Image (tube, helix red, strand yellow):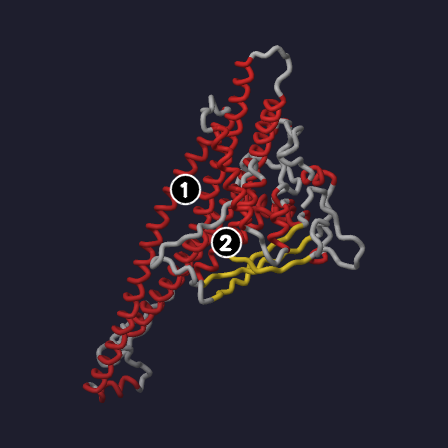
Amino acid sequence: MSASTPKTLSSSGQKPIQEICHPLSAAEEAVVRTPSPDVANNTASIEDKDLSLPNGTPVDTSSPASSSSLLNRLQLDDDLDGETRDLFVTVDDPKKHVSTMETYITYRVSTKTSRVEFDLPEYSVRRRYQDFDWLRIKLEETQPTHLIPPLPEKFVVKGVVDRFSEEFVETRRRALDKFLKRVADHPVLSFNEHLNAFLSSKDLNKRAGLALLTKVGEGVKLVTGGYKLRLRPLEFAAMGEYLDTFTGKLGTIDRIAQRIIKEQTEYLAELREYGPVYGSWAGVEAGNRDNNAAVGVEEDRNHSSSGHHSNGNGLQAPLEGVAGGVASVAAAMEELTEDMSQDFLPVLREYVLYIDSMKNVLKKRDQVQAEYEAKLEAAALRREERTTVPSDVEKCQDRVECFNADLKADWERWQNNKRQDFRQLLTNMADSNITYYQKCLAAWESIIPLLQERPADSFGRGQDKVI
């Protein structure tokens, strides 16, 4: 796939995606035409450039003044992004396949695009997890200077998580969808030829790529294995320190959140056992009312003529109300627990994996710098009678500068995605808790009118209601 500027389809009678025209502006063309890591003149410092999103929207790293402005900014960013993108991907429709050798899940990958690198404007292929894994490996191989979004973890503990359950499959589908969307939105990764093949080809040749990657990895280790990096530049050292701190915070939140979910699950089980007790108690009171009516039938008839009826010593209706209220609270608790386990925890784990990916890119950058320093020292020790720097040293220096520029740009993009993702996550968490407590409040308030009625005596003689 060439890195040419995306264009709309030629006049073939086909309409733009979803009948929405989204041609790239001149500013966006500059972003798309960012030179690849192999171009030696990509040495400009990131500090001298304006930070911007892939769609050309400037990034403001300052914190908005209020939560409402945060939500407005989030919505604004999403709207602008949707107007300018020319590659749309979706992962949906999981299907289970059973054969004599294995059982696995495939997902439908749908693509809509106006890029000339694609032969058709729309594609629909089916991919399984290992195909996504192949794509990520190929991206790491061909774009070593860039941060590759993480995939959800492949292996699960047997007997603990059913990897074919609807909940697990849906959680994985959403993670795969997010992974592919992040790649498609990246100004460099989205033009990778392997992404093109993944989205459009019916069959993927995956074995050759894996073998090549192994050889490349071994070569990097041989080059830098005997040299220790002098000192990581301060800006990259600060990135590493932040990632270490961020990892610790996410790990603590994840552990506590899992304990909360466990306690909520246990509480839910208690509620499901607790509520029916009041319902059965109400049945006992109803039976007691019938017995009392049989004993004092004449007296009860006299009072029933005045319009008063027994309600089980005034307890049957309130007890039934409590049973219904507890059931409502249990249903609300179940929804809250599902929100935490299916929406909250996956985001935390995604960013734990994201941090690992970022640390790997930092390590690769250090390896390139170590290679450059080793060659520079070797050239200085030779002290040959020449004033020019050896060409291999210059090439290695260009690689370091290119790596630095790409890493800084991806770091800013990652920080922007992180800010938006966690703003949305915390907003959803607040909404879920507000909804939960509102349902609990409504459930218990519905019982109050039942308790405000004056009970009848044991033979059904009712009293006036409390005004």
- Residue 248, position in %: x, y? 39, 38
Q: Quadrant of residue 189?
A: top right
Q: Quadrant of residue 383?
A: top right
Q: CA distance from mark 2 to mark 1?
A: 27 Å
Determine if residue 410 is in view: yes
Residue 92 drawn above or below residue 458: above
- Residue 146, position in %: x, y? 56, 38
Residue that lies at the very extreme toward the left in this rendered image: 295
Amino acid bearing label 1: Leu
Residue named by callout 2: 130
Q: Which is nearer the eye, 323 or 341? A: 341
- Residue 235, position in %: x, y? 51, 27
Residue named by callout 1: 250
Q: Which is nearer the eye, 400 or 226? A: 226
Residue 96 drawn above or below residue 84: below
Residue that lies at the very extreme toward the top in this rendered image: 385
Q: Residue at x 79, y 57 (%)?
A: 12
Q: Residue at x 38, y 44 (%)?
A: 253
Element at badge 2? helix
Amino acid bearing label 2: Gln
Element at badge 1? helix
Q: Residue at x 69, y 52 (%)?
A: 118
- Is residue 357 shown left or right of residue 321? right
The label nearer to you, 2 versus 1, is: 2
Callout count: 2
- Is residue 227 shown left or right of residue 86? left
Question: Circle 2: is it few (<14), some (14-19), or many (20+) Cα within 10 Å?
Answer: few
Q: Quadrant of residue 397?
A: top right
- Residue 344, position in %: x, y? 44, 51
